[in-house]
Every structure is written in C-alpha cells, then in structure tokens.
Image: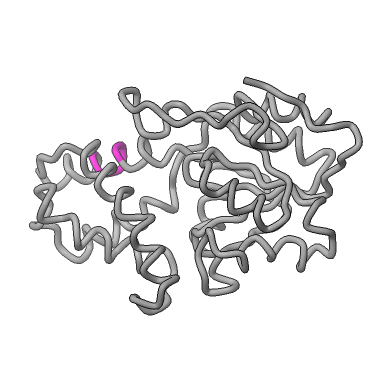
Amino acid sequence: MSRSVSASVEPAVLAFDIFGTVVDWRSGIIHQGARLGRRRAIEADWGAVADAWRGRYVPTMRRVNAGELPWGNLDRLHRLMLDEIAPTVGLDMLDEADRTELVHAWHRLPPWPDAVEGLHRLRRRFDIVTLSNGGIALLTHMAKTAALPWDAILSAELVRRYKPERAVYDLVPELFGVPHARVLMVAAHLDDLRAARAAGLMTAYVHRPLEHGPDRTLEIPAEGEFDIMAADFLDLAVRLRA
C-alpha cells in the first residue's frame, strides 16, 4: 500500500492528525481505565468504554460546529461525552475525581511503535506540526509524555472550530506563510484527508489497522485518492526521502 509523492512536489510543512494517527488512543484509554478500576475496585469492560467514548467524538464535534453546543476545548467535550456514556457502560458510580482523571487520560496516550522514530526522521527535512482537534494543553502534555518532537503545536482551539471545518486546515499555511499546496496533511482517517484535500492541502494516508482494535475492519482509500499512501511513519519517511 505505498506510493511516493511526485518528485515535482515538495511539501514545506507536514501537519499531523493525532488521535489514531500518531497515538494509540484505544489501548491508552483501556490501560489507564483499568488502572483506575483496580484502584477503585470498579469492574468495567474498558474496551467498550473506550469505544463508546470515542464513538461520541464526531457527533459532538459536529454539534459544536453547527452551533448546537457552545464552544469548548476537547477536555470539556471529553467530559461531556464521558458523562453521556457513563450510565451505559456501568460507570455511573464515578465521582468527580475519577472523571477528571479519565478525561486527563487523553493527555497521556502512547505513540504507535513507529511514531517517534518516524517523526524524528521527517523532522530532519521538514517542519512538523500537530493539526488536531485536541487542545493546546492536551497536545503539549501528550508531546512530553510520548516524546513527540513537534516543531509547533497547532490546534483547532486557535480558531474555535473543529475539523473538518476549513478554518482548521488554513491554520498551517497562514501561520507558516506557505501555499496550501506545500502543506502535507498526514492522517489515518479518510474524512480528515478528504477535507484537507478540499482545502487545497496535499494528503498522506497512513494505515493504522489496529486503531479500533483487532476486530474492526477499516475502509481503505482507493488507489490514487491521496498523494501518498504509507504503511507507517517510517514508510512515510522513505516516501518523502527523509
């Protein structure tokens, strides 16, 4: 599943989606939830908790973008989502401290095995930045925890809109002073990449088959839909000659 970028195209900045693309949110939430459960003697299916919680993500972003919910950063929205799912996954006994701890678990997610080395290789040749719906504090804490070597942390929080709104994708060209066509959006999610492409960015799909666990089948993009298709970040570095 690999295709190299055209030799005539040279990105200046690589912008990375984070949840599922750079970090393994599902395993991270399962691990930290299970740790809380052991300490508090709470029995729960933490895989189901992670899936239900993440399942509220896109609908909640859409409600904010549509004006149905007031603007809030992702910590506030993660708390709203947790409160919504708690009764359905056997966690209605969680107290305030428990809920705060779980919300902050999203700040401490583990990187995929190839992520740190791949980012270091890519950073030798390109500016690399986050372009995530995560808040600035969340992304900063995650970078420290997972040793992610970003040149800059850019967040939807800066424009108070959420992907796939165009204003988020415009951040990198505007702040780095480069044409849209010289920004490469890197993501494991087709909707993110399609919105980035519509905004005029280059696109790189990275395959993360285990994002939703071993039993989930992911949609694979059609050949040629995006500028690059890579197996992981190390493969992406090869495709970009980094």
At x 28%, y 62%, the residue is 100
**Where, by quadrant of the figure, is residue 46 drawn?**
top left
Residue 21 spot, x, y in % from top left: 53, 39
Q: Which contiguous range is marked in magenta?
A: 30-34
Q: Quadrant of the N terminus?
A: top right
Residue 203 spot, x, y in % from top left: 68, 43
Most extreme residue toward the top is 1
**Where, by quadrant of the figure, is residue 235 drawn?**
top right
At x 40%, y 64%, the residue is 62
Eyeballing the image, is 125 above or below 179?
above
At x 9%, y 57%, the residue is 92
Determine whether, in the image, residue 45 is placed left or right of residue 155.
left
Q: Is residue 150 magenta?
A: no
Residue 199 spot, x, y in % from top left: 67, 58
Determine whether, in the image, residue 168 is placed left or right of residue 23.
right
**Where, by quadrant of the figure, is residue 174 drawn?**
bottom right
